[in-house]
Amino acid sequence: MRWKAMAGAGLTAVLMTAQAGAADKPPTQPVGKATPAAEPAQPASGRRLSEHLRDVVAKEFKRFVAPHFAVTADGPLDAELRAAAEAMRDEHLPRVRVLMERWFGEELGEEPLRDAVTRLQARVANEFALWGRDSTGPAYDAALAQALQTPGLCNPGVKHDISELVRRLNYLRDLPPDVRRQAVQAERELLARWGQPRQVSDAEALPAEDLLLQLRASDQAPQKAVVPALAFYYLGDVDDRRRDPLRADGPARCAMHQWAGASAAQFRAALALQAPEFVIGQDRRQAAALNDDGYPRAASYFAVKGSVTVQAEVNANGRLVRAKVIKRALKVPGIREARPFTLEGAMDVATLARAKETDWLVSAPAQGTRTVEREFLWNPR
Amino acid sequence: MKTLKRHLLAALLALCPAFALAQAPVLADTLQDRAAKALFWGDWDELERLHGAARLDTRRSEEGVLPACLFARGIGRKYDDDSLAYHEARVAGTREWTQRRPDSALAHAVHLEMLVDLAWFHRGSGFANTVSDQRFADFRAKLDEALAYAKANGAVMTQHSFYTRPLLALMRGLGVGLDKQLEIARHGLRKEPGDECVYLRLVDSLVPKWGGHPQQLEAWVRESMKGLSDTDALARYARLYDWAGSVDFHQGFFDASLVRWPLLRDGLRQLIKESPKGRYWKNRLAYYACMAQDRDAATPALEAIEAGPSFDAWGRDGQRNYQACRRWALQS
Amino acid sequence: MNVKLLLWAGALWCVQAVAQAPLPSLANSAYERAHRAMYWADWDELERLDAAARVDPERARNGGLALCQVREAMGGGHGNPSLAYHEARVAGTLAWAQRRPELALAHAAHLEALSGLAWFHRGSGYANTVSEQRFRDFRATLDRAQAYAEQHAAVLSGDGFAAQVMAELLRDRGASVAQQLAAARRGLAKEPWDECIYRSVINNLMPKWGGSPQQLEAWVREAMRNLPEAEASMRYVRLYNDAVGHHYEQSLFEDTLVQWPLMREGLKRMVATHPQSEYWRNRRAFLACMAKDRDTAAEALEPIDKPDLDAWGGGSDGQRNYQACRRWALQS
């Protein structure tokens, strides 16, 4: 990743300049009573950031965070939801900025220094993923479950590219007024939890993409009607016009998992943002593709390591009939005190691809099929 | 004085909604896309909302089109890569919608349209000799299914005029006579008198490729103009004949129909006046002026669009038509 | 072991392997090469390709002759051609003909370029989609081509490609079918083996150009004369198959004098003679469905996993034709 290296080099240069600058500047004394700064507070822990370093954070914030909270007049939200979205955005973005400065301060104390920005990105991305999976409780789950019964839930409106905040609130638009109000309030509370250690659902998403591919291969009409958009993108008549479900964007993924019958928790798990999507602009398929060194791109970028365990059903010929991920033990620099949900998607895809290429003959039964588990190790060189 | 104040306040309050509506973004400018997207994503509630809004907010779009017509065009949007699975998903999804909302006229009418579209998907849009017997069989089977559905749900569906669109398309596919189609259109108009979209819809049936005659088309255009002011009538004349010209007559317009160039020209000018920001009518005026060999009208019309012609408005091979028209009009 | 010796041995082995490897067939690459040569105005390459194709009777995977591929490429457009593109072709081929005045190919290429320009003006739509101005440009360019042909009649006379182009020009200018066939026969008089001339004239015999089923049948029979039985059978298939795409489409068996048993035998031979051709494998099924021969269709469909859509009518029509045929042929 050339630009990651460049960013790292740039950061080092900035740090050296900042340190040199700090050494040259004479200490200043406040003239009078200190006025509270209009800008976000200094980080509570970790290294105090100079202006240069705060600029680094500001750039990351502007590029990777703010767009996910954009609210525009031409989006799908009605006036009430749009007002709520704007209020949430205005409340939340300064909060995130402070958090990012704090986290960056912490990362500057870790090695290697040149990867501090990447570690910050991973942490922010995981916060998005945690937000995606989090719930305020049964009432919120029930509201989402009710929304999942609504046809057209995933319609992004004319402007296909809507922010994460708008997408989440858009799901609530057709709920009964009371339920909707409470759900909007719950969304506000979930944002307020950012940065706090918390337990979120570890539900696994349904294999909706596989189900869609199976439907495609069967050439049969689906038992449950698919949204026309899914049929258009994934069930077309001609092979080379059919898209890959693993490359689906937000609206299509939403429709896929709604169609597959996801519960509220499963739906949230499926839609939780993955780091490669918004940091390096790659969908899960691309992120899982291997670099020249045989390592998944996203894993390489974020220096992911650890293992993913697969449960495989193997036939008498040693061929893999079915495989699914049953356990993960991944470590991602920058993500502490939380499971790295934000990179599990790409690692699952990469692991299953590896499983497909693996020779399972040693595990083959004499006849029929046999279920085995195998751990795949991922260690960057 | 108190009474005057009260009257003034009452007048203000009465005008408020109208004022608010006038200030609100024009629904028609985004309606077609929104309707198309809602159908694409199976958002039936949004379609209900949009349809309801289109019936209340009748302000024309920048190009001078009514919201109800744009809503219908959004429903009718076609995609290059459509497939059998896509059409079947639309049929299945709208069927579920009608089951969830059996009282919704719109749900039934849109489902009917999906059935008719699926039939046409089987047949394809080519000439009859490009369609295999097997495909014709599929086409007719689906049309029969659509007809049965229309008969079973006619009472609900005909509550407002959107149904005329799929029903007329169905009649055309079945080869039903024009008298019956006229009856359907007039039935729709009885519910919603003056509904321009209904007048436009029947034009499709009155062109030669669907068995129509120039006299029938002329009679229908004149019928649609009755009761309108002079300027509105001129605009209506231009709208309906323009639609006919684009659907079938193309360059043979002035030879094969009863359209009169002076009326069409004046009607197009009226439409440009009503929709000064629109580009379609300005291009169309130039297009027809060249077709009518009216250099005096063509030259200023071409100048008006010189900065950026819209080739979509110039028929098949639009760019070539435009360039040939320019060369001809600008030669001394 | 001596590494240098190893390397030399390896290199020698490579040279020997390459020398023994069969040369890629000209027919499989002729179209692409000629198209590129045309695009880059590489007239010398075109001359080389034409000369090579004349003496290379080996057919491509799909059974096409190299010579026909070269000529097709010389007549083809490139993506979405513009006026500038066509004018460049006209100018470039004229310069070629002036540089090589004795070369019939160069003059024929220039005629073909003028024909291409004329059709660019007209467009490929039905006459009622073409404006008066564009028709004028079309006719003026055809007149230019005619004048050129007359001026260079001597060098053009008897050349196969020139005969093809002349027959097309006569057709476009409204000459009788008899005159068009006479032009084609002038080429065949010198090159009776030239299948490309027989094939190119099929379009001239379509009803849309004033031809009749009887004229088509007569021409096909003329093309089969003096050929061995197997070759004659396959030529029958080739020519009637061309008629499908040019005009008759699904009405081939109703509206022409083609005999399905002869087609069936010929198609069986085509598949056997060109076993690598997905096109003919699919086309056999396509035509069997058209002829409503369920047994042949089912047998032909059996080895087809993924249809070659070109053989089924191309694009989404092709997909629908294939699906409808499968459903019909495989139903019990």
Image (cartoon, coloured by chain):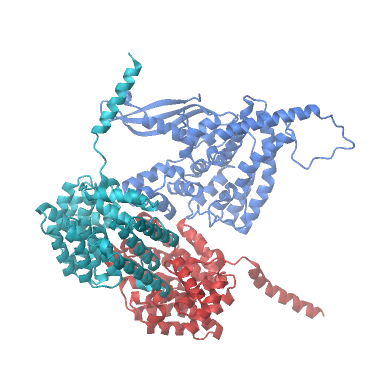
Q: Residue furthest right?
A: A32
Q: Residue furthest top?
A: C1
Q: Nearer the viewer, residue A243 or A217?
A: A243
Chain drawn in red: B
Q: Residue at x 85, y 32 (%)?
A: A28
**B255 left or right, relative to A31:** left
Looking at the image, can residue A99 be seen? Answer: no
Q: Position of residue A201 (x, y in %)?
A: 53, 37
Left or right of B77 on screen, residue C164: left
Q: Is residue B278 above or below residue C238?
A: below
Give residue C79's quadrant in the image: bottom left
**Residue A230 visible in the picture:** yes
Chain in blue?
A: A
Percent position of residue A11, x then y: 66, 31
Vertical order, A290 against C239 (above or below):
above
How many tags in the picture? 0
Most foreground residue, C19 or A277: C19
Nearer the observer, A12 or A84: A12
Q: Is residue A185 left or right of residue B121?
A: right
Quadrant where the N terminus of chain A is found in the figure: top right
State the image coordinates of residue C249 (x, y, percent, origin top left).
25, 63
Please tell me in which quadrant of the rendered image residue A123 appears.
top right
In the visual, does A222 lie left or right of C188?
right
In percent of width and height, residue A131 lies at 58, 40
Report the chain shown in cyan.
Answer: C
